[in-house]
Amino acid sequence: MPLDPDRPRKLLLLDSASLYFRAFFGVPDQRKDPSEPPTNALRGFLDMIATLVTAHRPTHLVACWDDDWRPQWRVDLVPTYKTHRLTEGSDVVEESPDDLSPQVPLIREALAAVGIARLGVADHEADDVIGTLATRHHGVMPVDVVTGDRDLLQLVDDAHDVRVLYTGKGGVREPDVATQALLQEKYGVPTGEAYLEMSVLRGDTSDGLPGVKGIGDKTAAQLIAQYGSLAALREAVDSGDPAIKGARRTNLEAASAYLDVAPTVVRVVRDARVADVDVALPTAVADRLALDELAARYGIENPVGRLLTALGLD
């Protein structure tokens, strides 16, 4: 049965790599013969979309893609950016489990066959695609961002109906639904912008961002709350504010060069040249023959069926 045409409009933006990595590590490998192609990430990713569509009832959906997971312009600003994720001996390839890599093209094929929009843009990460599409749809429809990456909490914006469904602990079935109230309650910051500035101060080892020595989540949030912004905090340091003293002053001064560039690296791009295409949920399977062949070849008839049911295309 097709989706209800009177369903309130909502855009769901998927941080695709975040989800298929989670699927790979969370869904059991059911192969009896190791010579068979792995499918756990593919199966899990399709099931995740089915779960999200059923639970959150979007009318529009985009699988946002990393066309460049480590853009050079970010590396130029902070050379350690994602360095630890590089495959040994390489400066361009992200380390990825051997059994995951061959599944990524299959995920792309499945999305295309079903008719779900998949968008990336050269020299940018999926985060930038998400930021651009969320901004593009401000005032048009509510936006839910699905990710396991805390960086995207910077997009939370009650005034523009942008939430983040953070899958860190509960997965796609029980995500933390991040609004500004949750940011205040859990992180001590009132807005997505304040979260961004707090994250710059504390750093992020998973992204190779050093932060300011001696400043963790709580201290970073307290400083942003006290001074109102990172810029105001830095002005207070430069002007000799007596409230900033000792090791904290020393560490903030030592991190000056990092603080000059880190906000640009951490901030998602809001105006990337993302293609302007129809991102409504499909009203018919885009390529039934290709989808049936893919399902039969890799034994994924069940997750494909669940996805089509969720989309009202079965």
Image (spheres, rainbow, N blue to C red):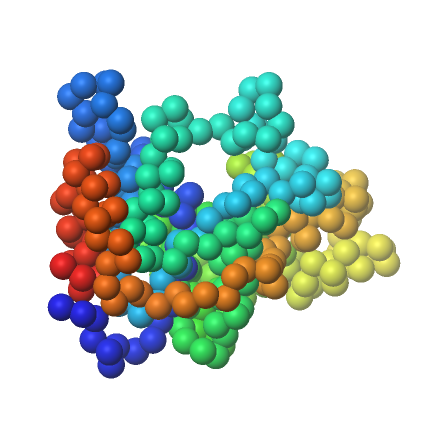
Q: Position of residue 84 (x, y in %)?
A: 57, 28
Residue lying at 74% horizontally and 63% vertically, measured from the top left: 232
Q: Is residue 99 left or right of residue 31?
A: right
Determine the residue located farthest toward the front in the rendered image.
289
Residue lying at 59% horizontally and 60% vertically, measured from the top left: 273
Viewer-proximal residue among 119 and 43? 119
Q: Position of residue 30 (x, y in %)?
A: 18, 28
Please tell me whether residue 158 is drawn above or below residue 252 in the rendered image.
below
Residue 293 visible from this viewpoint: yes
Q: How many marks?
A: 0
Q: Quadrant of residue 17?
A: top left
Residue 168 visible from this viewpoint: no
Residue lying at 62% horizontally and 43% vertically, measured from the top left: 71
Viewer-proximal residue among 314 and 226? 314
Q: Quadrant of residue 239?
A: bottom right
Assign the N terminus to one quadrant of the image.
bottom left
Q: Position of residue 253 (x, y in %)?
A: 80, 45
Residue lying at 16% horizontally and 52% vertically, measured from the top left: 306
Q: Position of residue 98 (x, y in %)?
A: 39, 24
